[in-house]
Image (cartoon, rainbow, N blue to C red):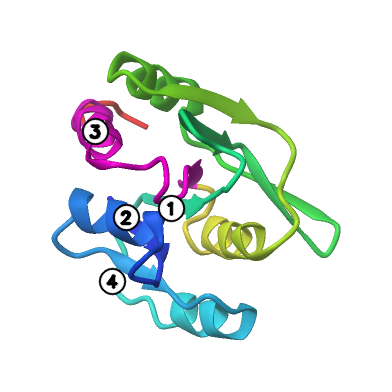
């Protein structure tokens, strides 16, 4: 499982993937940069878990079911309900969204879904204002459970 976030010392996704993995993959915060980053991926595992910050979230996460690029809707084929259940069991709120976002996260997710043949998920998390150490511990607990699931 590859954990992916966005670069930035004050980016909650960067902080979280560093907590979850000894070898996280960090994306540049620009359309051209993230495309180059994703193209550079070598020897990728079979599943990707991406995180991005969303300033509208404060207590939980939003799991994105799909991305939309150039009018094409690309859907994750992972067991998103099982992921949401594990996150809730760990003590964080989780919802699944069927409405792709319209900016950098959507672009990155669409490219990763294509690269991983649908075996990826994008999870929006709170910004650093709300994604404190307690939040990180809940996510660690959730992903220990998620790693046991055949996604």
Mark 4 vs 1, N-terminal side = 4
Magenta-colored stretch includes residue 12: no
Which marked residue is nearer to the observer: mark 3 or mark 4?
3
On screen, residue 45 above or below 39: above
Q: Mark 2 or mark 1, which is nearer the start of the sequence?
A: 2
Give the mark nearest the N terminus, 3 or 1: 1
Q: Vertically, is 99 above or below 68?
A: above
* Position of residue 27 measured from the top left corner of the image (x, y, whole percent): 44, 72
Region of the chain picked out in magenta, as a range = 119-147
The residue beneath circle 1 is: 50
> Do residues under tags 4 and 2 come within 8 Å of each other at their CB atoms?
no
Q: Front-most of 118 and 71?
A: 71
Circle 2/circle 3 CB separation < 8 Å: no
Element under label 1?
strand
- Neighbourhood count class around disc 2 (C-alpha, 10 Å): few under 14, some 14–19, many 20 upward: many
Viewer-closest of 17 and 58 = 58
Q: Is mark 2 on a helix, strand or loop?
A: strand
In the figure, is residue 3 to the left or right of 56?
A: left
For the point 41% across and 62% down, the residue is 11
> In the image, residue 19 lies at what x, y percent?
19, 51
Q: Mark 3 points at which residue?
A: 134
Image: 85 above or below 54: above
Crowdedness near tag 3: few (<14), some (14–19) or many (≥20) residues, C-alpha within 10 Å? few
SS at mark 3 in the image: helix
Q: How far apart are marks 3 and 4 (CA)?
A: 33 Å
Dots 1, 2 in contact, CB < 8 A: yes
Sequence-wise, which precedes: disc 3 or disc 4?
Answer: 4
* Residue where numbered disc 4 is placed: 43
Q: Return the residue at label 2.
A: 3
Pick the quarter of the image with the C terminus: top left
For residue 45, which quarter of the picture?
Answer: bottom left
């Amino acid at each position: 499982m590859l954990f992916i976030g966005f670069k930035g010392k004050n980016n909650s996704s960067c902080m979280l993937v560093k907590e979850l993995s000894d070898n996280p993959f960090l994306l540049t915060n620009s359309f051209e940069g993230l495309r180059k980053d994703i193209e550079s991926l070598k020897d990728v595992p079979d599943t990707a878990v991406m995180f991005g910050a969303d300033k509208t979230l404060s207590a939980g996460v939003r799991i994105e079911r799909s991305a939309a690029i150039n009018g094409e809707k690309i859907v994750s084929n992972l067991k998103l309900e099982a992921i949401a259940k594990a996150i809730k069991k760990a003590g964080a709120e989780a919802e699944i969204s069927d409405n792709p976002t319209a900016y950098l996260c959507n672009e990155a997710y669409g490219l990763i879904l294509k690269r991983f043949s649908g075996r990826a998920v994008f999870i929006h998390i709170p910004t650093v204002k709300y994604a404190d150490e307690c939040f990180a511990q809940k996510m660690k607990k959730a992903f220990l459970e998620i790693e046991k699931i055949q996604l």
